[in-house]
Image (spheres, rainbow, N blue to C red):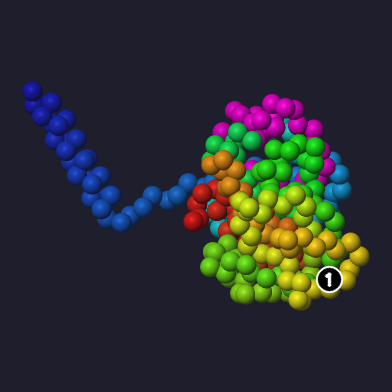
Amino acid sequence: MRRFRWVFMMMAVLGILGLLAANSGIAKKPQKGKLLYMTLCMGFKHDTVPLSKEIVKKIGESSGAFETTVTEEVGAFTAENLKNYDAVMFNTTGELPMTDAQKQALTDFVKSGHGFIAVHSATDTFYMWEPYMKIIGGYFNGHPWHEKVTLEVVDPASPLVSFLGKSFEISDEIYQVSDFQADDTHVLLRLDPNGTNMKKPGVQHRFYGWPVVWTRRYGKGRVYYNGLGHDKEVWESLEYQKMLLMGIQWAMGRLK
């Protein structure tokens, strides 16, 4: 009888300590997110892809926000393996040799509430697979500009871009976008035609202009695309790295 009384007393004490901890404002250290970074290029491969692997890892490690696994293996895209990750990131080109089952695993992963992050040439990927366009929000359609341009901050209230001011200049390769899903996409940055040479050959004028950075939803999942990142100097800039950090955290559901 004494033994049971002692057990009950210990349970009560532990319960009180737990309640005190919960009310003390002391929070547990948040668990790091898990990012799967896909860099397989079946078309043109940018010189900055190797550098990007180092920088994405560094961003996660220095911020403590996430851990990165880099892969060029389509075999990583199985329903079982994707359970280990909070988000997938693409820096890719061309028709990746994924099976139907692997493609389904990716769409199910994002649609169920996970994150998808894409940079630069990821819009130059999977033209023959329509669900990918629904995920990412548009396709690459030429790059008239590889020079200094002006980008407009469309939503300066968003923490993803609020630190950039109302507009800024940057030297990089700027993509045009076709099939842009304008109705359900939230544009964060776009090309400012007033600060850019619009007489370049190949410039396409569309009703949605020239979006560069955006977010969208795919099912319950969060999608972040950043069209910058052709040049080494862009990857090395603190502003671009902060954009990626914020975008990855938002896609993982860790930033409102």
- Left or right of 241? Residue 92 is right
Q: How far across and down, in percent of the image, does residue 53 sit? A: 72, 51
Is the residue 130 above or below the residue 158 in the image? above
Residue depicted at x 61% and y 51%: 184
Taking the magenta stretch, the answer to whether it contains residue 85 is yes
Taking the magenta stretch, the answer to whether it contains residue 182 is no
What segment carries the magenta color? 77-106
Q: How far across and down, in percent of the image, does residue 106 sit? A: 65, 35
- Left or right of 94? Residue 100 is left
Label 1 sits on a secondary structure element that is loop
Q: How far across and down, in percent of the image, does residue 239 sit? A: 65, 67
- Left or right of 5? Residue 127 is right
Q: Quadrant of the rendered structure where residue 94 is?
A: top right
- Residue 70 in sight in this render: no
Is the residue 22 above or below the residue 203 in the image? above
Tell me the residue that label 1 is attached to.
198
Neighbours of disc 1 within 10 Å: few (<14), some (14-19), many (20+): some
- Mark 1 belongs to which amino acid? Met
Q: Nearer the viewer, residue 207 or 58?
A: 207
- Residue 200 in sight in this render: yes
Residue depicted at x 48% and y 46%: 31
Is the residue 8 above or below the residue 193 in the image? above
- Left or right of 173? Residue 75 is left
Question: If the image is split into quadrants, where does the N terminus sit?
Answer: top left
Q: How many marks?
A: 1
